[in-house]
Image (cartoon, rainbow, N blue to C red):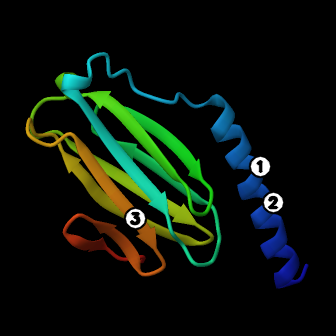
Amino acid sequence: MTREQLVLIRKALLAAAAVVLATVLPQDYAADDDRYAVTIRVTNKLSSRMALIVHCRSRYIDLAARFVVPDSSCNWKFNRNDAYPGTDFKCRLAFQDKRLDFLAITVRKDVAEYVYDVFDDGVYGADGRISEWA
């Protein structure tokens, strides 16, 4: 098999996995009251126009994986009271053969939304680039 054929097969498998993920995974981890809601939002701004797989979780709460097409976002909304103050949520991003892990949030009472943009050179948050592709 040629390298090009392997690349096409890999892309087809990723696309099939994305369809499965999009249809079976929950949309939100119950945020009953917006006063206590915390949102994590990740936007795919990759110039390659490739889809992105995003999976965020803490030690005890798995927010599930999402498939993010180019120029779109995914988000999770959950109740900050379901996580102890100081709980870390980490996210893993993947596209093609690249992987990236970063600390998305440490739950605090004064922050309700965490927004991240994913570019070719890494992940950017409110304070600039926070992580680079490995």
> Could you tell me how far apart the alpha carbons at marks 3 and 1 are, in whole angstroms?
24 Å
At label 2, the amino acid type is Ala
Residue in view at x 23 percent, y 64 percent: 126
Callout 2: 10 Å neighbours few (<14), some, many (20+)?
A: few
Under circle 2, the secondary element is helix
Residue 79 x/y as whole percent: 26, 25
On the image, numbered disc 3 is attached to which residue?
117
> Could you tell me how far apart the alpha carbons at marks 2 and 3 are, in whole angstroms?
25 Å
On the image, numbered disc 2 is attached to which residue?
12
Residue in view at x 36 percent, y 77 percent: 132
Cβ atoms under marks 1 and 2 closer than 8 Å? yes
For this orientation, the residue located farthest to the right is 1
Name the residue nearer the viewer: 131 or 43.
43
Name the residue nearer the viewer: 21 or 2.
21
Q: In which quarter of the image is the N terminus?
A: bottom right
On the image, numbered disc 1 is attached to which residue?
16
Q: Which quadrant holds residue 87?
A: top left
How many marks the image carries: the answer is 3
Q: Which of marks 3 and 1 is in front?
A: 3
Under circle 3, the secondary element is strand
Residue 122 x/y as whole percent: 39, 75
At label 1, the amino acid type is Ala
Asked whether, in this view, residue 113 is left or right of residue 107, the answer is right
Relative to 82, does residue 134 appear above or below in the rendering? below
Residue in view at x 70 percent, y 47 percent: 17
Going from N to C along the chain, the mark reached first, 3 or 1, is: 1
Callout 1: 10 Å neighbours few (<14), some, many (20+)?
A: few
